[in-house]
């Protein structure tokens, strides 16, 4: 037997619309969302925080791992924790760009074309198994992420605000997979891995999910206007000159020691992620430790070491070599 119903949250009492107006309330909102997700996902606490921080920092997230470790479930749980439109795009080899963005269809009655919005028009969009679609279709989503808008038949349409993409990809390379090129990976603020649960986590996971899956009863606990407010608060977190200089030195280290180092866009994303982490920890300023923690998930997928050293190792060596002031 399972107790799947027991953890089902009471949505009315946890929605906090209009209550996020400072760092403390923004941090409380993140705690509520975290708790909500944890009724579905066992373990992976750091990954959950990384995703929530990326959302605060106006970023998009790529979850990469072997099949069956909860990527899709985690992305669904995050998406359902926020009020607003949740859209899921299952990427397949025959998916077309128009299946992502939408198409103009002829309306007989009106004798005119009308736009049928594609699933990219959502507040939280799950791009599932993105590497199963050909590059052109992936490109439609990645362009939307970069521009916050889509253009179909010459007309440009703005995407909703907030608009966040959580994409998943299977790490298993086979012939049916189209790996994302570096330039496109750069559009994701973070690339995260889940990993296998430990023994007790796996037992716990089985207990929760063997019956009716808890995702079925998951309700939103944060409103869109609160998320927008929290994003504004994150963007205003102070980053003093020595911290900016620290981030720059990390970037320069990767440029000197890798074939392709961190782009300035990457450095910016690093500091934004650090601002998000400061909010979650209830601080109104970024400390070097925020930068350190975020560097490990913001940098590796954007660089190419060009040697035996992995990108992860290169970032670690940057962090152990450079001393923040
Ligand atoms: N850490 C976890 N916590 C909760 N459920 C998990 C976890 N890992 C795997 N699962 C469960 O395993 C099943 C497969 O997960 P899924 O998200 O589809 O995997 P993936 O997308 O990584 O292939 C789901 O029912 C999911 O709830
Ligand atoms: Mg999946």
Image: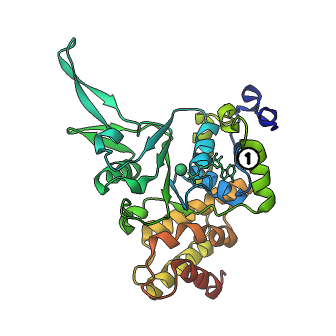
Q: Which residue is mark 1?
A: 38
Is residue 39 found left or right of 84 in the rendered image?
A: right
Closer-to-camera residue (210/19): 210
**Quarter in which the C terminus is drawn:** bottom right
Horizontal side, residue 148 vs residue 313: left or right: left
Tell me which residue sits at (33%, 45%) in the image. Answer: 95
Q: Residue 212: where, in percent of width, then height?
A: 70, 34
- Please name whichever residue, 243 or 252, is drawn nearer the observer in this view of the structure: 252
Residue 284 in sight here: no
On the image, which quarter does residue 151 sit in?
Answer: top left
Report the label total.
Answer: 1
Q: Mark 1 packing: few (<14 Cα in 10 Å), some, or many (20+)?
A: some
Above or below: residue 260 compared with residue 267: below
Closest to the observer, 240 or 157: 157
Q: Is residue 12 left or right of residue 120?
A: right
Residue in the picture at 56% in, 65% down = 271
Colour scheme in the image? rainbow
User: Circle 1 — which element?
Assistant: loop
State the residue in front, 235 or 176. Answer: 176
Is 142 above or below relative to 226? below
Q: Position of residue 158 (x, y in %)?
A: 37, 38
- The quarter of the picture where the N terminus appears is top right
Residue 143 position, x and y percent, is 34, 51
Q: Is residue 155 visible?
A: yes
Q: Residue at the location (28% across, 53% down)? A: 136
Disc 1 residue: CB within 8 Å of ligand 1: no
- Left or right of residue 244: residue 159: left
Residue at 75 percent of width and 45 percent of height:
35
Residue 240 lies, in percent from the top left, at 62, 68
Task: Residue 317: name its quadrant.
Answer: bottom right
Farthest residue toward the top?
109
């Amino acid at each position: 037997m399972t107790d799947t119903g027991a953890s089902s949250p009471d949505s009315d009492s946890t929605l906090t619309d209009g209550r996020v107006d400072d760092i403390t309330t923004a941090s409380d909102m993140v705690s509520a969302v975290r708790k909500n997700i944890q009724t579905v996902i066992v373990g992976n606490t750091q990954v959950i925080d990384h995703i929530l921080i990326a959302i605060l920092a106006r970023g998009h997230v790529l979850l990469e791992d072997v099949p069956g470790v909860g990527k899709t479930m985690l992305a669904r749980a995050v998406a359902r924790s926020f009020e607003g439109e949740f859209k899921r795009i299952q990427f397949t080899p025959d998916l077309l760009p128009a299946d992502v963005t939408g198409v103009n269809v002829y309306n007989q009655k009106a004798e005119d074309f009308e736009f049928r919005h594609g699933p990219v028009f959502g507040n939280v969009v799950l791009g599932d198994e993105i590497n199963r679609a050909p590059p052109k279709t992936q490109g439609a989503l990645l362009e939307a992420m970069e521009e916050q808008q889509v253009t179909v038949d010459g007309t440009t349409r703005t995407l909703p605000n907030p608009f966040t993409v959580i994409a998943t990809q299977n790490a298993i390379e086979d012939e049916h997979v189209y790996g994302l090129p570096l330039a496109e990976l750069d559009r994701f603020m973070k690339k995260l891995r889940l990993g296998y649960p430990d023994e007790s986590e796996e037992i716990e996971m089985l207990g929760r999910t063997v019956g009716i899956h808890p995702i079925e009863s998951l309700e939103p606990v944060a409103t869109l206007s609160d998320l927008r407010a929290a994003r504004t608060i994150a963007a205003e977190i102070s980053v003093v000159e020595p911290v900016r200089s620290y981030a720059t030195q990390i970037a320069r280290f990767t440029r000197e020691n890798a074939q392709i180092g961190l782009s300035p866009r990457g450095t910016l994303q690093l500091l934004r992620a650090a601002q998000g982490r400061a909010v979650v920890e209830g601080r109104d300023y970024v400390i070097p430790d925020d930068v350190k923690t975020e560097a490990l998930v913001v940098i590796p997928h954007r660089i190419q070491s060009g040697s035996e050293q992995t990108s992860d190792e290169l970032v670690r060596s940057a962090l152990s070599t450079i001393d923040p002031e």
